[in-house]
Image: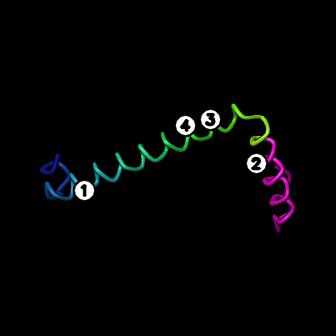
Amino acid sequence: MAGQSGLTMLQVLEQAVAVYRRQQQLETLNAAYAALRENPVEWDQLQEERAAWDVTLPDSLEQ
């Protein structure tokens, strides 16, 4: 891979670790949202907070 890309082996490894880290973070985030959705009270609180922030959008565009 390093030879094909013109990168050093260390650069290839650094990129692979960065991709893996992002993947792990997204999986953790997805699991947290799944758990949150299982709790109706907390999920409703999140939706209310999002609605409150939505009024701050300056563009007035429909979503």
What is the distance, in whole Å, between disc 1 and disc 4 at their CAs? 26 Å
Residue type for callout 4: Ala
Q: Residue under label 1, please give it.
A: 14
Q: Does the magenta stretch include residue 43?
A: no
* N-term mark: 4 or 2: 4
Does residue 12 appear left or right of residue 30 in this picture? left
Mark 1 Cα shell of 10 Å, populated few (<14), some (14-19), many (≥20): few
Amino acid at circle 2: Leu
Camera-side residue: 8 or 43?
Answer: 43
Amino acid type assigned to the residue bearing label 1 in the image: Glu
Extreme residue toward the top, this view: 38
- In the displayed structure, 38 sits above or below 9; it is above
Q: Where does label 4 land, which residue?
A: 31
Q: Residue 46: image x %, image y %?
A: 76, 48
Q: Which amino acid does label 3 sit on?
A: Ala
The quadrant in which residue 23 appears is top left
Q: Can you give x and y, in whole percent of width and height, for residue 18 in the image?
A: 33, 53
Q: Is the residue marked by circle 4 packed among few (<14), some (14-19), or many (20+) residues within 10 Å? A: few
Query: Gap in Å between the C-alphas at discs 3 and 2?
Result: 13 Å
Q: Give the range drawn in magenta.
A: 44-63
Question: Is disc 2 placed on a helix, strand or loop?
Answer: helix
Regarding mark 1 in the picture, which secondary structure is present there?
helix
Q: Name the residue under label 2.
A: 46
Task: Mark 1 or mark 3: name the one nearer the start of the chain.
Answer: 1
Using the image, tell me which numbered label, if any, was put on residue 35: 3
Is 54 left or right of 36, judged from the image as shown? right
Check disc 3 and report its element: helix, strand or loop. Answer: helix
Residue 34 in the image: state x and y as whole percent.
62, 34
Q: In which quarter of the image is the N terminus?
A: top left
Q: Which is in the foreground here, disc 1 or disc 3?
A: 3
Identify the residue shown where x is 49% and y is 44%.
Answer: 26
Label disc, if present, on residue 28 of the rendered structure: none
